[in-house]
Image (cartoon, grey):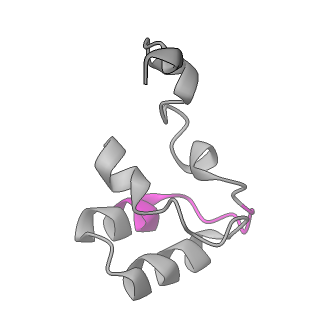
Amino acid sequence: MYWTLELALTLEEAPWPATRDELIDYGIRSGAPLEVIENLQEMEDEGELYEGIEDVWPDFPRKDDFLFNEDEY
């Protein structure tokens, strides 16, 4: 299982919180790349709710991870 920022962002509008099966269903209905569906299927299904993409991909970059000055834009 591997995630990239591009793949993870396809789940940005997912109906959080969601179970693994709900995320797979959302991915299929929204036309997410096959890699996203495969990554979700590889996750262990313990019936838990995922609150956001950070629960699915713990290394998801946050705004704080980028070094730029917002005042310049």
Q: Is residue 41 magenta?
A: yes
- Left or right, 70 with reference to 9: right
Residue at (48, 62) in percent of width and height: 11
Residue sitting at x 40%, y 62% = 10
Residue 3: in sight, yes or no?
Answer: no
Q: Is residue 60 left or right of residue 31?
A: right
Numbered circles on residues, count: 0
Question: Where residue 48 sits: x, y (%)?
Answer: 74, 62
Q: Is residue 59 above or below residue 57?
A: above
Residue, far front? 72
Horizontal placement of 58 versus 34: left or right? right
Q: Residue 69, image x and y in percent?
A: 48, 13
Residue nearest the viewer, comparing 69 with 72:
72
Q: In this view, which residue lies farthest toward the bottom?
A: 29
Q: Position of residue 72 (x, y in %)?
A: 44, 16
Which residue is nearer to you in this view: 19 or 16?
Answer: 16
| Residue 12 visible in image | yes
Magenta residue span = 39-49
Residue 20 occupies quadrant? bottom right
Horizontal and vertical percent for residue 31? 32, 81
Q: Main SS of the magenta segment? A: loop
Location of the C terminus (image quadrant): top left
